[in-house]
Image: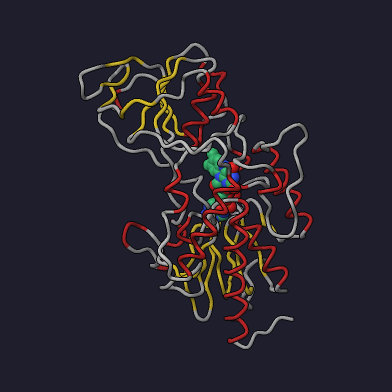
Amino acid sequence: GPTSSAPLDAVVIGGGQAGLATGYFLRRAHLDFAILDAEERPGGSWQHYWDSLRLFSPAEHSPLPGWWMPREEGAEFPSAAHVADYLAAYETRYELPLRRPVRVSRVRRDAGALVVESDAGTWRARHVISATGTWRAPYIPAYPGMDGFAGRQLHTVAYRNAREFAGQRVLIVGGGNSAAQILADVSQPAETTWVTLRPPRFLPDDVDGRVLFDVATRRAAARRMGVSDDGGVEALGDIVMVPPVLEARDRGVLKAQPMFERLTRRGAHWSDGSEQEFDAVIWCTGFRPVLRHLGPLGVRGEGGRIEVRGTRSVVEPRLHMVGYGDWTGPASATLIGSGRAAKSAVADIAASLREEGRAPD
Ligand code: FAD
């Protein structure tokens, strides 16, 4: 069983791309570890994304460590299903010790180790890497009138495809890539209105995920060398002009209005007094890091953030964070960027184990 008297060198919580990339380096360092994942199947959150979703970059620009993502036949920008298949093949290829479905409820300290409690047993570990992503913590802002709106409301996480909105009037909320891609989708069979807090910032047509990664890398290097950086990726814009979004622009639907003031029973009301009726509201308003399981460690600071040095928690040095966002390393929540954060986490862990006199070969 998982509960043994001798703790594992490491337990990884989460079996998406961040957990797998971490597993790759733990394997290479010859450490004893397990990866606990709440899903029934491989693929992390990629298995849940909507049908039309396309990567920001060609397959060859989205590798996990060690093995390139194969090309998807007939598609320069791979689908989410293709990425999920790649992750499934990746964990088989590197014989990663995945346990599924295992939902971790909490991580706490006991004498000399961290204890990882789940619905499928308890693991003891010298080090824990949390890689639980953001998909399971959708964020919807509070607006007056939301409860009284008679139509349907859903978050990005519940969106699958545009068919169910055919012929409807749909309000899409949010200024990021999810909003732009879902708008491109829904505006084909439905009549859409797009609202954003600030005017949307479109990236130049020729900037794709590869350019974004290069900028994030240069920015990290500049910071390391103490050079002030130029604002990096954020200064360029937010929305990547993938082919469906370009096509939506050509159709003239990629035009945003200011945010409404409140929802009404039948639609939305703006501060200038105007109103519009809607059958559905899709909240593409983002995600928060999934961190509840770390509560007992007391590592969360102001605003719920975990203070890290590199990927390591300042308060609990046996805890590492991989993925989530730029705060665990530049572009660490992208496929290609997760490897860099994972590598640095495992290097730190291996160094700690050596200091403790546990020298794996
Ligand atoms: P996840 O994929 O969410 O994996 C986390 C895993 O942890 C899940 O399997 C989950 O079930 C599990 N888990 C959570 N809580 C627990 C728990 N308590 N116990 C056990 N297991 C748990 N990136 C790119 O590189 N290119 C792109 O083009 C791109 N497009 C994107 C488009 C969209 C719409 C979104 C949302 C993201 C996109 N990303 C893209 C960003 C990024 O690659 C993903 O967010 C990525 O899935 C994050 O991986 P992860 O492993 O950190 O988290």
Q: Quadrant of the N terminus?
A: bottom right
Colour logic: secondary structure
The answer, for residue 258, to whether it is visible in the render is yes
* 292 versus 238 height, above or below: below
Q: Is residue 232 left or right of residue 30?
A: left
Counting from the top left corner in percent of width and height, residue 259 is at 31, 29
Look at 57% across and 38% down and name the residue there.
206
Counting from the top left corner in percent of width and height, residue 130 is at 53, 61
Q: In which quarter of the image is the C terminus?
A: bottom right
Look at 59% across and 86% down and name the residue there.
356
Look at 77% across and 54% down and name the residue there.
92
The answer to which of 299 and 21 lies nearer the viewer is 21
Counting from the top left corner in percent of width and height, residue 200 is at 40, 34
Q: How many labels does the image show?
A: 0
Counting from the top left corner in percent of width and height, residue 107 is at 49, 65
The answer, for residue 132, to whether it is visible in the render is no
In which quadrant of the rendered view does residue 162 lie?
top right
Residue lying farthest top? 167
* 146 versus 126 height, above or below: above
* 35 versus 194 height, above or below: below
The answer to which of 249 and 135 lies nearer the viewer is 249
Look at 45% across and 41% down and name the residue there.
238
In which quadrant of the rendered view does residue 28 lie?
bottom right
* 268 versus 71 height, above or below: above
